[in-house]
Image: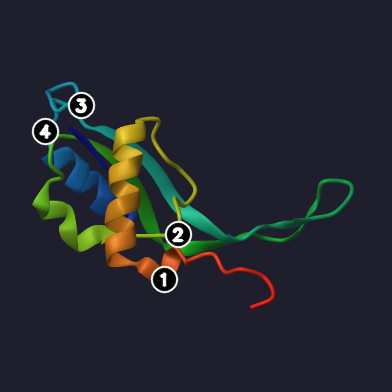
Amino acid sequence: MKYFRKYQFGSKSAATAKINALGIDEEGNPTHNNAIVRLGNLVVTPAEIDAEGNVITEAVLTDTYHVDVLWDGEPNPDWDAQMVWCAPMGVHTFGSSSAIAEWTEKCKELHPEYFPEPVEEGI
């Protein structure tokens, strides 16, 4: 089974070290079957741009570096300290419907506040 997880690190170099620890060959290619997407520092506030395309205000980014992993099997427990949960999927997701369903159920279990129950209007 595949598992989808989101992680944040204090820096790009910390994320790279963790990714490389999963295994790379002498040419720098991964020796594992996990799919990894380096999202980088996420946009908190988008840049403000005028009609001519000039940047009026620079974008504000997170101080943390983000990585998504589609684990080929159980997630590596060495990564647990960097795991984050967000509502509902964040800026990226993988195409595996079973991995997304598992992630959603786990997130609901850990953070039900991200999934409020619908309310009927007029009550």
Q: Secondary structure at mark 4?
A: loop
- In this rendering, the label closer to the viewer, 3 or 2: 2
What amino acid is at disc 1?
Glu
Instruction: Please give the residue where the numbered disc 1 appears in the rendered image.
Output: 113
Q: Which quadrant would residue 31 be assigned to in this image?
A: top left
Instruction: Please give the residue where the numbered disc 2 appears in the rendered image.
Output: 87
Of the numbered discs 4 and 2, the one sitting upstream in the chain is 4
Q: Residues within 10 Å of mark 3 (few under 14, many from 20)?
A: few
Which residue is at 18% across, 47% downward? 18
Which residue is at 28% across, 41% downward? 69
Q: Is residue 45 left or right of residue 9?
A: right
Q: CA distance from mark 1 to mark 2?
A: 9 Å
Q: Secondary structure at mark 3?
A: loop
Q: Secondary structure at mark 2?
A: loop
Q: Is residue 116 left or right of residue 65?
A: right
Q: CA distance from mark 4 to mark 1?
A: 37 Å
What amino acid is at disc 2?
Ala
Q: Which quadrant would residue 68 be assigned to in this image?
A: top left
- In this rendering, the label closer to the viewer, 4 or 1: 1
In the picture, the quarter occupied by the N terminus is top left
Of the numbered discs 1 and 3, the one sitting upstream in the chain is 3
Would you place residue 28 above or below residue 116 in this image?
Answer: above
Would you place residue 92 above or below residue 35 in this image?
Answer: below
Give how far across and how far down residue 93 sits, in percent: 42, 40
Give how far across and how far down residue 79 sits, in percent: 17, 53
Q: How many marks?
A: 4
* Residue 62 can be seen, yes or no: yes
Q: Residue furthest bottom?
A: 123
Instruction: Please give the residue where the numbered disc 4 appears in the rendered image.
Output: 23
Q: Residue furthest front?
A: 123
